[in-house]
């Protein structure tokens, strides 16, 4: 097909059927079942060289790598690739991963901004992950988080696992040493 060679075609035989061939069945060929839907991957992809205006609604995963203007509502995951330029409000019931540029509000269960991600709009999520280098201009609203029910007064910060580590005596010689936690070296919080 692509190599320049013509596919070989079987030459007709003089007898019509080979001598040891079984007789041809009289039943029509059965239809091939469509492939089952995969749980991973992207069912809908807007390629890097594509510009689209309108509305995308999907019950599966969607990936946008091109330019899009409109609204996006996805029941699965939504990926905005590095080459994407999106001017739309984004809603996903699962995760929204942003590696490109988005101008519009973003709402999802989990929003992940990659280091190349840029958002000009408000973000509403249960969980938010931002990598170093990501950019956000807008409000961030955390929903369904335990701190909302506790309020500011009840929001106790977790205590660190240790506060002071004291080196052993042989550290003065420059040798590699293990450190020990010393209870008597912990700072007194009453000071």
Image (cartoon, grey):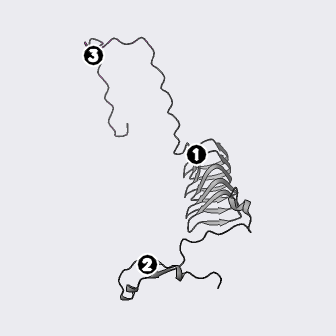
**In the foreground, 41 or 69:** 41
Q: Was residue 4 drawn as part of the magenta stretch in this picture?
A: yes
For marks 2 and 1 on the same chain, the one whose residue lies earlier in the sequence: 1
Residue 154 placement (x, y as % from top left):
72, 66
Label 3 neighbour load within 10 Å: few <14, some 14-19, many 20+: few
Which mark, by number, is residue 179? 2
With 34 as the anchor, is 112 left or right in this view?
right
**Disc 3 to disc 1, how far (Cα)?**
51 Å
Residue 12 placement (x, y as % from top left):
30, 18
Residue 110 placement (x, y as % from top left):
62, 55
Evaluate if marks 2 and 3 touch, with contact meaning CB atoms under 8 Å apart: no
With 56 as the anchor, is 63 left or right in this view?
left
Q: Secondary structure at mark 2?
A: strand
Disc 2 or disc 3, which is closer to the eye? Answer: 2
**In the foreground, 190 or 41:** 190
Which mark, by number, is residue 13? 3
Evaluate if marks 2 and 1 touch, with contact meaning CB atoms under 8 Å apart: no
Label 1 neighbour load within 10 Å: few <14, some 14-19, many 20+: many
For marks 3 and 1 on the same chain, the one whose residue lies earlier in the sequence: 3
> Which residue in the structure is indicated by mark 1?
61
Position of residue 29 relative to residue 77, above or below, is: above
Q: Which span is picked out in magenta?
A: 1-29
**In the foreground, 14 or 157:** 157
Q: Secondary structure at mark 1?
A: loop
Q: Was residue 63 drawn as part of the magenta stretch in this picture?
A: no
Which residue lies most toward the bottom here? 172
For marks 2 and 3 on the same chain, the one whose residue lies earlier in the sequence: 3
């Amino acid at each position: 097909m692509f190599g320049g060679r013509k596919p070989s075609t079987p030459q007709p035989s003089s007898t019509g059927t080979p001598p040891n061939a079984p007789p041809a069945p009289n039943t029509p060929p059965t239809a091939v079942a469509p492939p089952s839907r995969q749980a991973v991957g992207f069912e809908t992809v807007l390629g890097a060289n594509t510009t689209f205006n309108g509305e995308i609604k999907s019950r599966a995963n969607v990936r946008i790598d091109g330019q899009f203007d409109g609204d996006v509502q996805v029941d699965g995951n939504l990926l905005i690739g590095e080459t994407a330029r999106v001017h739309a409000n984004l809603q996903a019931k699962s995760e929204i991963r942003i590696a490109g540029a988005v101008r519009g509000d973003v709402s999802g269960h989990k929003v992940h901004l990659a280091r190349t991600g840029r958002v000009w709009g408000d973000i509403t999520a249960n969980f938010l992950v931002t990598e170093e280098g990501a950019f956000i201009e807008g409000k961030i609203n955390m929903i369904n988080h335990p701190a909302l029910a506790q309020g500011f007064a009840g929001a106790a910060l977790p205590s660190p696992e240790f506060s002071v580590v004291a080196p052993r005596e042989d550290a003065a010689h420059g040798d590699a040493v293990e450190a020990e936690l010393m209870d008597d070296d912990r700072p007194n919080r009453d000071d």
